[in-house]
Image (cartoon, rainbow, N blue to C red):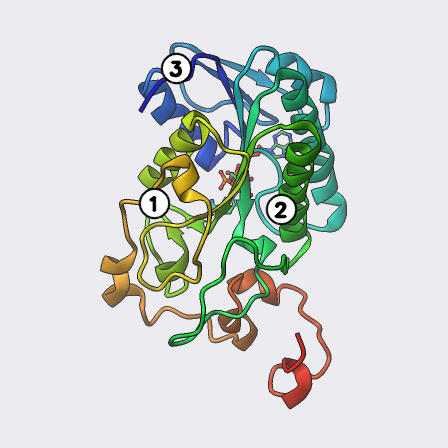
């Protein structure tokens, strides 16, 4: 995999995935500009610098992005939160990232989420998988902010020619721990390879990728992986015997792709068992 000619910025560098990317991409020889609102907890790699600030600070974002070729945008609210907590980092902060990318003509790699489409039903049997151009069906304010982020990428590509790769991350954790993750798991090495491909692909345009490993039980179908030359190499399948029986028992959570996020403050009238509750899309 080639080394980018310009520095690459990583937001959310102090978070779980930011630390992983920092470690692996610096080991691959990349020059990194890191940022987070929290201190960077690891020794700073050679060829990396770190600035601590809030993504709400547009001037700080602009300054740090000077001269970068790509921004791996992993910072912000990473779980369901009240609306007021989400809008600062995930809406305003994202706008700052895109304005910086516009000025630098940089590519944005956006850590989107399956929660932007979480209220799609899980496919059963031979039911069709979801393609990248399915409707957004966010399962909360967090998922809504990710749909907004993908649409911002759509707009900046159409209007300003700013390339962006939107990674609809399933469940990116070291291990598969429940049945849902047999469908949604993304291994750490597959994420690292995905980010390398997303940054170094000659052309990206506005791309959407289902960011999960090569899982037989996947919910997801077509996307733009060929455009960026990425194929997952790992799979959740081997964990089936240990995790198949690990389910929540919550009928809403088990019905929808977004899992536990769909049932947070769920208050749709009619309840799960009422016949008409789910008949209309
Ligand atoms: N881990 C997953 O399975 C998964 C799944 C879907 C999407 N994602 C997305 O990937 C990204 C990284 O996820 P993670 O698991 O590493 O989350 P994380 O919470 O560990 O990391 C997020 C980082 O963002 C920083 N941050 C929060 N608010 C900020 C602000 N106002 N200004 C600057 N920095 C701020 C936090 O300090 C944290 O270090 C997130 O955008 C998340 O939504 C992750």
Most foreground residue, 180 or 71:
71
Looking at the picture, does residue 123 appear above or below residue 178? below
Lower position in the chain sequence, tag 1 or tag 3: 3
For mark 1, what is the residue? Answer: 187
Number of numbered discs visible in the structure rendering? 3
Dot 1, how many residues are within 10 Å of its Cα: few (below 14), some (14-19), or many (20+)? many
Most foreground residue, 254 or 152:
152
Q: Are marks 3 and 2 in contact (CB under 8 Å)?
A: no
**3D distance between C-alphas at marks 3 and 2:** 30 Å
Looking at the picture, does residue 219 appear above or below residue 276? above
For mark 2, what is the residue? Answer: 146
Residue at figure coordinates x 41%, y 56% from the top left: 184
**3D distance between C-alphas at marks 1 and 2:** 21 Å
Query: The residue tagged with tag 1: helix, strand or loop?
Result: loop
Q: Is mark 2 within 8 Å of ligand 1?
A: yes
Looking at the picture, does residue 37 appear above or below residue 146? above
Dot 2, how many residues are within 10 Å of its Cα: few (below 14), some (14-19), or many (20+)? many
Left or right: where 184 falls relative to 83:
left
Dot 3, how many residues are within 10 Å of its Cα: few (below 14), some (14-19), or many (20+)? some
**3D distance between C-alphas at marks 1 and 3:** 23 Å
**Ligand 1 found in image quarter:** top right
For mark 3, what is the residue? Answer: 45
Residue 59 at x, y = what percent? 73, 17
Q: Quadrant of the C terminus?
A: bottom right
Residue 45 at x, y = what percent? 39, 15
Residue 163 at x, y = what percent? 57, 30
- Look at the image and tell me whether residue 55 can be seen: no
Q: Nearer the viewer, mark 3 or mark 2?
A: 2
Residue at figure coordinates x 43%, y 58% from the top left: 221
Residue at figure coordinates x 53%, y 63% from the top left: 260
Q: Name the quadrant containing residue 136.
A: bottom right
């Amino acid at each position: 995999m080639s080394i980018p000619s310009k520095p690459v910025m990583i937001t959310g560098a102090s978070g779980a995935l930011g630390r992983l990317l920092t470690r692996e991409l610096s080991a691959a020889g990349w020059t990194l500009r890191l940022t987070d609102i929290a201190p960077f907890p690891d020794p700073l790699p050679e060829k990396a610098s770190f600035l601590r600030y809030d993504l709400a600070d547009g001037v700080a974002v602009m300054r740090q992005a000077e001269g970068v070729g790509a921004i791996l945008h992993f910072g912000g609210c990473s779980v369901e939160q009240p609306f007021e907590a989400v809008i600062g980092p995930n809406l305003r902060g994202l706008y700052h990232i895109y304005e910086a990318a516009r000025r630098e003509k940089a590519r944005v790699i956006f850590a989107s989420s399956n929660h932007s489409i979480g209220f799609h039903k899980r496919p059963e049997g031979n039911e069709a998988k979801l393609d990248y151009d399915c409707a957004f069906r966010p399962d909360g304010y967090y998922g809504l902010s990710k749909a907004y982020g993908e649409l911002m990428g759509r707009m900046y590509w159409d209007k300003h020619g700013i390339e962006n790769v939107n990674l609809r991350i399933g469940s990116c954790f070291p291990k598969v721990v429940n049945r849902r993750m047999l469908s949604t798991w993304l291994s750490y090495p597959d994420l690292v390879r995905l980010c390398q491909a997303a940054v170094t692909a000659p052309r990206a345009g506005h791309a959407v990728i289902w960011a999960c490993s090569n899982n037989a039980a996947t919910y997801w179908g077509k996307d733009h992986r060929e455009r960026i030359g990425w194929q997952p190499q790992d799979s959740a399948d081997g964990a089936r015997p240990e995790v198949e029986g690990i389910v929540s028992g919550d009928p809403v959570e088990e019905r929808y792709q977004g899992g536990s996020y769909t049932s947070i403050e769920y208050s749709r009238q009619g309840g799960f068992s009422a016949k008409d509750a789910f008949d209309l899309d």
